[in-house]
Image (cartoon, rainbow, N blue to C red):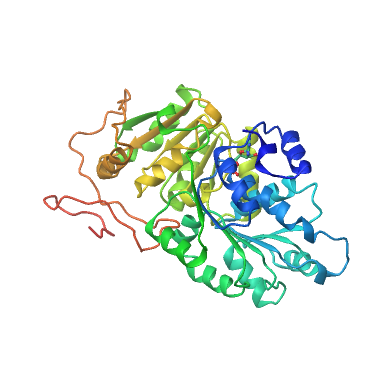
Amino acid sequence: MSFETLGLSADLVGMVAEEGYTEPTPVQAAAIPHVLAGRDVLAAAQTGTGKTAAFVLPILDRLRKHANTSFSPARHPVRCLILVPTRELAMQVDESVTTYGRTVPLRPAVVFGGIPIEPQTKELRAGVELLVATPGRLLDHVGQKTVNLGQVEILVLDEADRMLDMGFLPDIQKIIALLPPRRQNLMFSATFSDDIRRLSGTILRDPEVVEVARRNTTVEAIRQLVYPVDRDRKEALLAHLIVREAWGQVLVFTRTKIGATRLATYLDRRGIDAVAIHSDRSQPERTRALEGFKTGTIRVLVATDVAARGLDIEDLPRVVNFELPWQAQDYIHRIGRTGRAGAAGDAVSLVSIDEADLLRGVQRLLKQAIPWKVEDGFVPDRNAEPQPLRGPVEGRPARGHHYPHRTADRPRSGSGSRG
Ligand code: AMP
């Protein structure tokens, strides 16, 4: 399979060759012809599958008829709206639109919250054809009347499942009400939950459904290991493993923002360069942290699931679950960040007795048991009592939020348990 056979214009085929893409990824091969044909598409694909090019390339070809050199903003209305859940993803998609669109004279722009609105306002007023946006900030612009969505021909919902998880449904509905009813709709989601199917039922018209596996990565290709450890020794064990095994680039997941900050501070104080990345950080801070991590000045990036979503970090050698996620599915998202492009990857989980139920949930989903290793000097206390696990959980609103089951015959201790 080659890009030529998908029906893309010669300049785009040349552009992808310059980017070093030798053949389309599965989601590209499956989705591009449908998008070019003007069909609605529902695609199961997550970051790392090449999904961005799967919609950006055919969209560029469909909209190139609108390219013009007029200075009048009215000649550059928004034709394509790409909604994304997070600032990081917004920046990445914008970068892709700019890169892939370099041969097509349509104007791209990106708007997201957490930074001043004025420069975005100025850019929007000048006219843009391809707009990447997070829902909240887009509605701010709509409120200020800096953007008109009345000529949108193509709507993309990227990481739709995460947008629902983050509570963006009302915003999405408000935005859709501003769009022309006749348009092409593309929806990308890592999972096809019931909520996603319901949403797609209300937005998409007779969609082509595309389901493909992650690019080159299957869970089987990732070496997984669980270290059982007492909850109050996790930090020490992690620092010990990083130093002893000379781990380079490590992405570490925590369940909470506070936990991420606390862990990064702990590692940093022990001479291990670490930064926490989460939604309370300013945009420049997050960008700097990600750059530092990619270039190697930061050895450990500590992230919550929401913050990590959309981060495009390729060929990561190792992912650590400092805490297991509430949702077993998130374990797969997390470890899928390693072992990309066929490279070997390691996924290490530090699991305390409180997390036994979460681990069982993961193993049930994987349909496999994960090997264990007890580290010398970190043998867990056999008599330790499980504690109820507590939030707050970034990006996990109350709906669908399950605290792990706790056996009733043990005394309850601590606060915040919802049982
Ligand atoms: P995405 O899933 O859109 O976040 O893309 C993940 C990464 O794959 C990005 O860094 C792209 O540059 C890269 N990529 C996209 N399409 C291809 C392709 N056909 N061949 C090789 N790399 C690709």
Quarter containing the N terminus: top right
Q: Is residue 406 left or right of residue 59?
A: left
Image quadrant where residue 5 sits: top right
Split into quadrants, the picture shows ligand 1 in the one at: top right
Nearer-the-camera pick, 14 or 38: 38
Q: Position of residue 325 (x, y in %)?
A: 37, 46
Nearer-the-camera pick, 327 or 9: 9
Tell me the residue at 58%/35% (across/down): 314
Q: Position of residue 124 (x, y in %)?
A: 75, 67
Quarter containing the C terminus: bottom left
Q: Position of residue 172 (x, y in %)?
A: 53, 68
Q: Position of residue 251 (x, y in %)?
A: 50, 37
Q: Is residue 164 left or right of residue 419?
A: right
Q: Is residue 182 left or right of residue 229?
A: right
Tell me the residue at 66%/65% (across/down): 153
User: Is residue 198 shown above or below 29?
Assistant: below
